[in-house]
Amino acid sequence: MLIAIPLSTFGTYALSFLIGLNRIRERSLLVVINQFVTLVLAALFLAVFHPTAQLGMLAVLSGLVIALFFAQIFLRGHWEFRRSDQPRAATIGRALSLGLRGQLGNVATFFNYRLDVFIVNYYLSTAAVGLYAIGVMVSESIWQVPNAAAMALVPRTARQQGQSGAEFTCMVCRHVFTLAVLAAIGVAALSAWAIPAVFGEAFRASVPVIWWILPGTVALAASKVMCADLMARGMPEYSSLFALVTLVITVVLDLVLIPRMGIQGAALASSVAYYANSMLVAIVLRKKLQVTWGSLFIPTRAELSAYLRLWERFAERLRPTAAV
């Protein structure tokens, strides 16, 4: 695991370089290569040899090494550093300042996502932790599209910060919010059947957790896009500050609700905290971009018509073909 730390760190920088160069396809390919190699080698090692944790880590290391090999190919020409090209101290200082202002939020966000698990364990039991973790994991599945959109938005906004950049951010935020709402409706409707079918009847108690936390995860989906815009404009401190506020709200509500409502109380606490975070970020972004609430969250008629046409095409494909 210690060997994996520098490799993983270097891989993270490689992915960041590709994002900065707006080469999203190569960045995604690196991630797929890493995960695919790790999975295949783990299955091979554990099938051929006696299963051990060391073999699992060997598969992880192999995936990192092969991914870094392809990263070197993708970034060929960008690793060359000449003495005359060394950044000045002022440039390094600005870069470190930007990173530190954002890192505080990353730490707070990590605890905001995971600290409630320890509080659930303290008040309830390890079984309750498992039920709660399944509910949280399923609800967070709707963040796949927002995470991808936020990642792709950063380099574009950093290069184009005028009114056109603001309009593009609003468009992305509207679509992400709409897709998150639709995905949440689908998850809420299917979870009562899917959770017992996949995990077993013993996990049916995870279903209300999903229902309680989904409103907050939908709100935070839009927040991910808005935070990406603020970061690209050199203002990550807002996300950090609001992440700290969200952490305080989560802990306070956990202490109040978990003893009274159990794991559903933990889900409600997270949902309220996520919603508060999204509203705070939206207030700041709306002021910075000088846009309306509707432009951030409400799709236009043309966009709604496009969604309707897409649904009609999808429904048409599902209809059985008439017999000739």
Image (cartoon, helix red, strand yellow):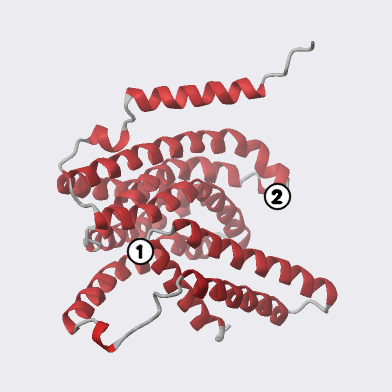
From the top left corner, tell me how far across and down residue 176 is, in percent: 40, 41
In the image, residue 267 above or below residue 120 = above
**Can you tell which of label 2 and label 1 is closer to the viewer?**
1
Label 2 close to label 1 by CB (< 8 Å): no
- Which residue matches tag 1? 20
- In the rendered structure, the answer to whether residue 150 lies left or right of residue 56 reads left
**Residue occupying the point 24% across, 49% down:** 280
Q: Nearer the viewer, residue 137 or 154?
A: 154
Q: Earlier in the sequence, mark 2 or mark 1?
A: 1
From the top left corner, tell me how far across and down residue 175 is, in percent: 38, 37
The kind of secondary structure element at disc 2 is helix
Quadrant location, the C terminus? top right
From the top left corner, tell me how far across and down residue 130 is, in percent: 61, 58
From the top left corner, tell me how far across and down residue 120 is, in percent: 51, 60
Q: Give, as a three-letter code, the residue at label 2.
A: Phe
10 Å crowding of disc 2: few (<14), some (14-19), many (20+): few
**Residue occupying the point 31% across, 31% down:** 298
**Residue occupying the point 28% across, 40% down:** 170
Q: Give, as a three-letter code, the residue at label 1.
A: Gly
The answer to whether residue 89 is visible is yes
In the image, residue 274 above or below residue 83 = above
The kind of secondary structure element at disc 1 is helix
Quadrant location, the N terminus? bottom right
Q: How far separated are the C-alphas under marks 2 and 1?
A: 40 Å
- In the rendered structure, the answer to whether residue 127 lies left or right of residue 275 reads right
**Residue occupying the point 23% across, 63% down:** 237
- In the rendered structure, the answer to whether residue 205 lies left or right of residue 157 reads right
- Which residue matches tag 2? 199
